[in-house]
Image (tube, rainbow, N blue to C red):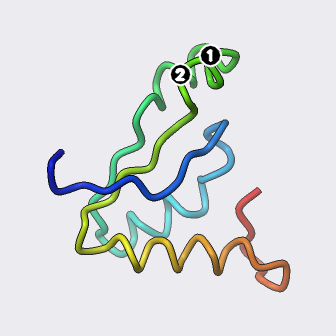
Amino acid sequence: MTHFQHIATFTYPHEYMVLRFIMEEEGIPYVFENETMIGISPFYSNALGGIRLLVHKDYADYVAELINDLEDPASHLRVV
């Protein structure tokens, strides 16, 4: 995990599904920390610090740009 960089934090799994599909399609190495625990017990999200997206450092800038594009109100694929 030394080559992975924290990019974003999400509260619930549904907030990053579109982003996850894009990263899988493009073969970007990523990890969502705390995903399983929060999926089982969503009320632990704040206590655990949310779901942290870690991306390989070679793709960090690209994924950050993807997130910004998805948050654009004009985008037809918005992250909630």
> Mark 2 to mark 1: distance in Å?
6 Å
Question: Who's the residue at 83% across and 85% down the image?
Answer: 74
Secondary structure under the numbered disc 2 in the rendered image:
helix
Residue type highlighted by circle 2: Leu
The residue most toward the right is 73
Front residue of 29 and 60: 60
Residue 79 sits above or below residue 14 on the image = below
On the image, the x and y values in percent for residue 50 come to 57, 33
- In the rendering, at what x and y percent does residue 27 appear? 29, 70
Q: Which mark is residue 48?
A: 2
Where the C terminus falls, by quadrant? bottom right
Residue at point 56% right, 46% down? Answer: 9
Which mark is on residue 4? Answer: none
Task: Give me the residue at 60% from left, 17% from top.
Answer: 47
Q: Position of residue 5 (x, y in %)?
A: 31, 56
Where, quadrant-wise, is the N terminus in this rendering? top left
Q: Is residue 53 left or right of residue 68?
A: left
Residue to which mark 1 is pinned:
44
Are the residues flagged by discs 2 and 1 in contact, CB closer than 8 Å? yes
Disc 1 crowd, CA 10 A, few/some/many (<14, 14-19, 20+): some
Residue nearest the viewer, comparing 60 with 80: 60
Amino acid of disc 1: Tyr
